[in-house]
Image (cartoon, grey):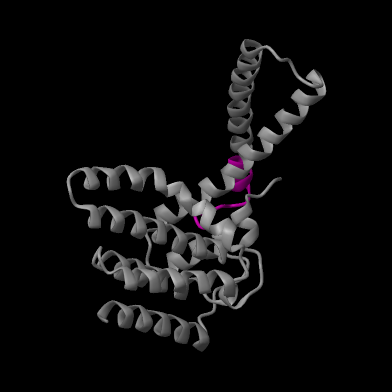
Amino acid sequence: MHHVLVDQWSQGASPMHARDPRAKVVALVAFLVVLATTAPDAFATLAIDAALLAAGILIARLPLSGVLLRAMGVLPFSLTFGLMSWMAGDRVRALGLVEKSYLSTVAVLLLIGTTPLPRLLSGLAALGTPRLLVLLAQFLYRYLFVISEQAQHLRLAALCRQGAGTKHRRSRFRAAAGALSVLFARSYYRAEGIHRAMLARAFAGRFAPLKPLRFRASDAVFALATISFFILVRVE
């Protein structure tokens, strides 16, 4: 099974990875609130927020360029709304909208890049997130890998049968459409098998974490220090 790159990042070892997911979620929420309430023309404050995120990425030993490039996925949406504000004559608000959305995406990537998703979901559940939402996220996470595995098998089978492949565009389109339908059919039956296996193992609607969460004193210090720093930067 081929794991996504961000999931591989979350398996690392750093001071950021070692923090309890609840502390990191609380720090992220505080950062997003402070960022959202920052004035669009407070460019010095936004620069400090950007520098803080860059420091967090370096402490977490994540590739800075990789995180920044993947955060650009939000730019098509933020640039659209920013362009509307720009055309309306509010250029400062347009720039602030793009900057805030980009920094928010970087912050979220820093969280999920330093926290395996099962532990992150366990932390969200411990913080009071509705169990149905957590369960849906857990199933989505697992079945995405089921679809990825089936897609890899289909791709390997297609390469074995076609060699270098056909150059005709229409033939390639038909092959891709057929492979897509087969992919979802196989994924559906695979998911049904997984569901029956879970019922056979007395699944009661809750995933038990392999490693229980432990909120240490260092996690409390991390959360309090980051929140205090965010508020200090916002006030000044």
Return the residue nearer the eye: 226 or 43: 43
- As for residue 90 lying within the magenta part, the answer is no
- Nearest the viewer among 139 and 35 is 35
**Which residue is depicted at the point 58% across and 52% down?**
202
Position of 234 compared to 128: left or right? left
Residue 130 placed where, x, y %? Answer: 37, 59
- From this view, report whether residue 226 is shown above or below residue 157: below
Q: Is residue 207 visible?
A: no
The picture places residue 6, in percent across and down from the top left corner, at 59, 56
Choose top left, top right, bottom left or bottom right for residue 129.
Answer: bottom left
* 109 and 69: which is toward the camera: 69
Observer-nearest of 229 and 124: 229
What percent of the width, then of the height, locates residue 4? Answer: 62, 50
Residue 201 within the segment the image draws in magenta? yes
Quarter of the view holding residue 37: bottom left
Q: Is residue 79 left or right of residue 17?
A: left
Q: Where is 129 relative to 55, above or below?
A: above
Q: Position of residue 122 (x, y in %)?
A: 50, 65
Q: Is residue 222 above or below residue 12?
A: below
User: How many labels, in total?
Assistant: 0
Image quadrant holding the N terminus, namely top right
**Residue at left 77%, top 30%?**
156
The segment highlighted magenta reads 194-207
The residue positioned 45% from the left and 76% from the top of the image is 23
Answer left or right for 114 relative to 221: right
Position of the C terminus, as image quadrant, is: bottom left
Residue 4 in view in this figure: yes
